[in-house]
Image: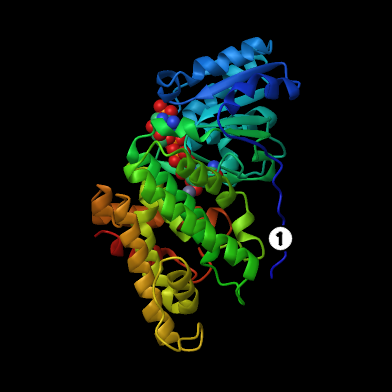
Amino acid sequence: MENFLYNTPTRVYFGKGTENQVGQLVKEQKCKKVLVHYGSGSVIRSGLLDRVKKSLDEAGIAYVELGGVVPNPHLSKVYEGIDLCRKEGVDFILAVGGGSVIDSAKAIGYGLANEGDVWDFYAFKRVPTACAPVGVILTLAATGSEMSNSSVITKEDGGIKRGCNTEYGRPRFAIMNPELTMTLPPYQTAAGASDIMMHTMERYLCKTDPTLELTDGIAEHLLRVVMKNARILVDDPANYQARAEVMWAGSLSHNGLTGCGTDGGGWESHRLEHELSGMFDVTHGAGLTAIWGSWARYAIDCRPARFAQLAINVAGVKAPEGYELGKDSACDKEIGLKGIAAMEDFFHSINMPVNMKELGIDPTDAQIDELADKCWKACTDGNKTSLGSIRPLLRDDMKAIYEMARG
Ligand code: NZQ
Ligand code: ZN
């Protein structure tokens, strides 16, 4: 087992009606003024924003508002938020929404707490030394940003999407009422479930050897639970129990738990996908399912037994009589490939794409090169000599995977 840091300082308030505690929870933060940050209107339409403001008013909290965060959140909105917070003397940011709103809130927090251009932290030019405190009311189970150390922002100029990961970026509290996710379009629910699965699969499909009984078991069970409940939600979107299972899995999938003791995973699909959503503005979770199978087939030869383990323990592939994991790599690969196909069948069953054509994009040859160039640049800017864990990827490997994922 590798050494690890497991840091989960976020207080979680989970369940029906928990959003009504927000005034009290913000008050406990002893801040002077709050920025209520939200997206393009779902929280207005659902009435959530009004309830949040009522709770803040009742607790005597001063606040200003900034809405308009878009999916794959923009740097320009972050700058607007930083300016507003400085002008208004804001010292606490309340994100009400999905991952994009939370990530924008964290970026504003970095901008407030540090001098200079906040983009430097996303361009890996500098490392932040603090973040203004952030609280969350989550409306979409997907990114795990409510407990994660990550914030992902897109610089509109050039469509450059980058993440900044630091322990300062973990929210102080996360309010999670599964009922708040019931207004989601089915596509966002399914993309969210897929993203949750990917946060665990990126950690699980790593090169750490031997297998880890506890961490692997947690990861495999989380995946099975999300798959079962994501299927339920396709036909029964108002199923509270299924919403709750998926929402809690979302937080545990990306707060570090499912990677404890591994090498941290390779994050290949995420890095490849960030270029897709940076350039084509696709939904992150759907971009991941469009790329994952191609990456998996590209990487399987480097550790077939790990893919076979996923196939048997998660994807429901039956191993032949007498099969022993890791004893015969040809047999491992055969089972692993069946597992990749079964995972793609699952993504189809919740109406997610498994290639770019199904995702609705058809990059030109020049755009495939641009995707590979950008992904490689993100790697080298971060001082890495390759991307990934199981099979280290160079620029041309990235290009090959994008080509495979065309569909
Ligand atoms: O903007 P509004 O009107 O709120 O609508 C949003 C948006 O259109 C809508 N929505 C959210 N909650 C809703 C709702 N609609 C109806 N009812 C609700 N309850 O859903 C749409 C998508 O929202 P968004 O926040 O963009 O989705 P998600 O939570 O999937 O966040 C995606 C972003 O997070 C990044 C992704 O790359 C992407 O930019 N990620 C952040 C991570 C992190 N910080 O740890 C990790 C992830 O791997 C990911 O990269
Ligand atoms: Zn993700």
Q: Residue at x 47, y 28 (%)?
A: 76
Q: Position of residue 25 (x, y in %)?
A: 69, 24
Q: Position of residue 152 (x, y in %)?
A: 51, 41
User: What residue is disc 1 on?
Assistant: 4
Using the rendered view, name the quadrant where residue 64 is placed. top right
The quarter of the picture where the N terminus appears is: bottom right
Q: Position of residue 172 (x, y in %)?
A: 68, 34
Q: Residue at x 55, y 45 (%)?
A: 248
Q: Residue at x 42, y 63 (%)?
A: 395
Residue placed most toward the observer, 229 or 363: 229
Query: Callout 1 environment at 10 Å: few (<14), some (14 to 19), or many (20+)?
Result: few
Q: Is residue 364 left or right of residue 45?
A: left
Residue placed most toward the observer, 61 or 263: 61
Q: Is residue 215 left or right of residue 400?
A: right
* Amino acid type assigned to the residue bearing label 1 in the image: Phe
Using the rendered view, name the quadrant where residue 92 is placed. top right
Q: Is residue 128 placed above or below 60 in the rendered structure?
A: below
